[in-house]
Amino acid sequence: MINILIVDDQKHIRDGLQAMLRQFPLQLENIYCAVNGIEALEILRQHVIQLVITDIRMPDMDGLTLMAQTKEEHIEVDFLIISGYSDFAYAQRAIGLGAKGYLLKPVKREDLQTAVEHVEHEIRTRQALSRNMEHISRRAQETDRKELSMYMQGAVSDEGWVLQTQGQNPELWQNYRLCLLREELWINQPGADSSHSIESIAYRVYGREGCVCLQHRPYLILAVDAAVDPGVFPAALKAEQKDAITAMTGPQQGLKELPNSYTQALELYHHSYLFPDRNCILPTHIDRLDQQWELPYEELYALFQLIGTKNSGTITQGISKVFHKDTLQRYHIRYTQQLSRAIVQMLEEYVRVIRPYMGEETLDIECLRNLFDYPGIRDYIQAMQQQLLRLNQFYYEYKCSYRNTQDLNEAIRFIHESYHKPLDLAMVSNHVSLNYAYFSNLFKKNIGKGFAEYLRDVRLDKARRLLAETDHKIVEIATMVGYESYKSFTRAFREVMDMQPTEYRQLMRRKYDSEGEYQDTAL
């Protein structure tokens, strides 16, 4: 698609040319019109025009002056000249200025079409060539960037490649800083082109010769001119409302220092977690940090002693205390990393104990292994608190479950030992030192039946055995299994067995007798 500008001081000529152009089989996007060179120049400044069809003689600014002015302003556009026979000398001058064709008035349809199609073909050829050259240039730049990025990250390269690459931008590699940047993006904030927009700001600050992009993801890494004050770039980002963390190394000399510079930039970036209120981290900010320390194991042990209690608030405060910024900002970032690993190890030990009792529930300990997976230290501390509180809840339930199991086992043992005595729920709950109502609910939840029903079943089970295997009177058996009266015993027995105790005894003896006769026959 091309844009055409018609320039003529006569309206009927402008309209006629426009009508003919729209009838041609051309891929036109827009046709603009101007009455003289001054108006045409304004349109050329505001729009991308590929072809100007202009009269030579016009008031205020003629066609030749318009052509000369576009050259002076470096406006790239092709011209077709329209003139009468008497203006041939002007037409020759126009050809000398680069006009692509010359049309005599009155303009014939076929001449206009031939001239415009010829120019259109030239335009499309140039555009295709330009696109190919840009593509080749981009691919070459991308290849160079990838090679530099691999070298920066430790890939081995020969001396010849290093010297050749350094020679492509000698002034920059003679004195540069490495910048590692990560933009802080919020939820629903578009970020697809964030690294490229930051990169464009860098080029404005340092210029094309003073800035080389080495990597886009996961961090934007730039080599920039060290002669520029290190505060200029962060200030430019802030002015453009880019909330980016910037780690900037000290001045480096020579491309051979690039791998070491990369290590330094990563270290600086990691230290940005200790200083969340700082948007630019320089070597001077970490030079004073202490390299020797002892982890607060006593505080950690005391913190984990609270696991399995109802002190969730104290646990949250404990994590905030051991990760207090005044402590973290005193030491190298390795202190924070070792502190995190120590807590993760303690978490794993606790989880190992209760894992069989957790069912499908689990803790996401993996999410705590790498501090730098989080946008900042605050996010990591919140994740640590969340997992500790979940562990606290699991461990509390585990301890309650274990304690309840022990209490229930003792209660059942006591019932089987004391069933023949006067026994009620209060006596059993007191025996295991549990609240009456709590024990009642716990017993039913875990045993599947209430205390009274369970005691009745235990007593009747003993009674059935005595009825079948002994000659004790039924009134004696009632007393032996804990019933205060013969009447209450027989009523309970009938409700469960659907027969009287005497009937059950007779049934069981007939069964034993038939089994004995069968054994004698078999012998």
Image (cartoon, rainbow, N blue to C red):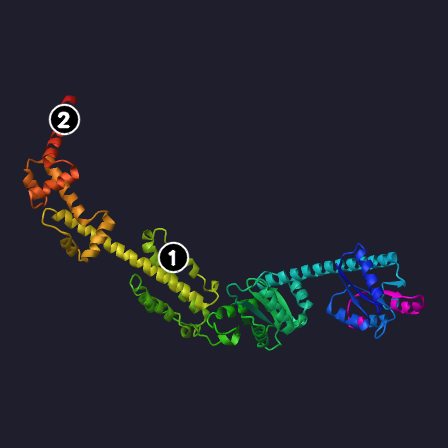
Question: Which element type, helix, strand or loop, lies under badge 2?
Answer: helix
**What residue sits right under mark 1 in the picture?**
363
Amino acid on which the number 1 mark rests in the picture: Leu
The residue range painted magenta reads: 69-94
Q: Position of residue 170 (x, y in %)?
A: 67, 70
Q: Position of residue 446 (x, y in %)?
A: 24, 49
**Residue plotted at (23% across, 54% down):** 404
Asked if residue 109 is among those painted magenta in the image, a careful observer would answer: no
Q: Classify residue 241 as left or right of residue 44.
A: left
Q: Classify residue 387 as left or right of residue 271.
A: left
> Quick check: 127 above or below 504?
below
Q: Classify residue 486 as left or right of residue 102.
A: left
Amino acid on which the number 2 mark rests in the picture: Ser
> Quick check: 17 above or below 58?
above
The CA span between labels 1 and 2 is 62 Å
Q: Which of 112/167 is in front? A: 112
